[in-house]
Amino acid sequence: MEIGNITVDKLVKKRGFIETSGYSSGLKVQIPMLVASGNSNSPLLVVIANQHGREINGIEVIRRIFEELNPKKMKGTVVFIPIANPLAVRLHQQDFPSEVGRWVKNVPTINMARVWPGKANGNIIERMVYVIFNQVIKKSDCVIDLHGWSDMTIPLVMSDKRCKKLAKVFGHRIFHLRDSKRREKSHFATICSNNEIPSLTVELPPQNRLSEESIGIGLRGIKNIMCHMGMIKGEIELPEEQFYTTAETKGHILRAEHEGLFVPLKEKGELVKRGDRLGIICSLETLDVIQKINSPIDGILFNKMIMRFEACPESNIVSEGENLCMVKKIYRA
């Protein structure tokens, strides 16, 4: 099997790259790739990370697990794409050429995770996506897509409803089930679903910095999936309790009624009861408590603190109307 500049032989680990065809706006990109192959090419697991440039924990997850894998104790092949967007990561921003269009209208922004399966003669991001999809993704038996949103939100595993077993086996405490075919047609998860490729999207916060907690979640999850697929031997590690949320259950967003200092009283990921005090807002003039924030339902505190645009500084100083936190209903897995 040939992938990029690598010939995938049995019982090997190799480093190489796949490359865009031709140039777009003067650019041609080499995308790093790592391959570990056991005594057969099948099954083929693909782990992709860093579609967005500030979501870097997945890079370290891939580095560690690649170093750890022993081809002589493997069945099948794992293809790792550790830095899917080498342009954005070097700019310390989510997208290339700019991320500003995420919150400012009419500013061009190319979100890599929203242009699948790409175009052979498109812009540079579409060309990168095209070669990754055609040389790697569409040949796979399973895909794990590693991301990383703000650390104000819990780590989360997301999958199509049809992949509930896979999401559970990944082994994180919380997972979310959605209907991938109802998302944008060019969304990475939708393309996998439309091509009957089981996939997981894993959010490993925070952005820009490495977190041992998130790296551990990623390492355990990939090993669990490999055990589940029969690629390596070992015990699947699951937490004592697992919960899940669904797309049909909308989050309850709690907002600031006044400007002030927002003081969270619960940690993200905590299970809360209806009426539990989640936080307070204090006056910036008197420091009196001017708003008490209580949970409207039994559920999980999905995030806390102000969820501003990704590039904006996070702060506990809030303005009237800003989102403070979100509580979601959960189900036992």
Image (cartoon, rainbow, N blue to C red):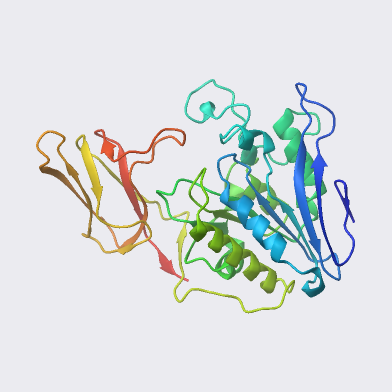
Give the image location of residue 280, x and y in percent: 19, 48
Quarter placement of the N terminus: bottom right
Is residue 253 placed above or below 198 in the rendered structure? above
Q: How many marks?
A: 0
Give the image location of residue 115, x and y in percent: 67, 37
Is residue 83 placed above or below 171 in the rendered structure? above
Instruction: For residue 118, say whether it is visible.
Output: no
Instruction: For residue 260, say whether it is visible.
Output: yes
Tell which of 15 and 268 is nearer to you. 15
Which residue lies at the image location 74% right of the left edge and 71% below the top edge? 231
When asked about the image quadrant of residue 282, the answer is top left
When asked about the image quadrant of residue 288, the answer is top left
Give the image location of residue 36, x and y in percent: 79, 61
Which residue lies at the image location 80% right of the left edge and 55% below the top edge? 139
Tell which of 301 and 193 is nearer to you. 301
Is residue 135 placed above or below 310 in the rendered structure? below
Give the image location of residue 180, x and y in percent: 59, 51
Tell which of 113 and 285 is nearer to you. 285
**Relative to residue 117, is residue 306 drawn left or right?**
left
When asked about the image quadrant of residue 97, the answer is top right
Which residue lies at the image location 19% right of the left edge and 36% below the top edge? 258
**Relative to residue 88, is residue 258 drawn left or right?**
left
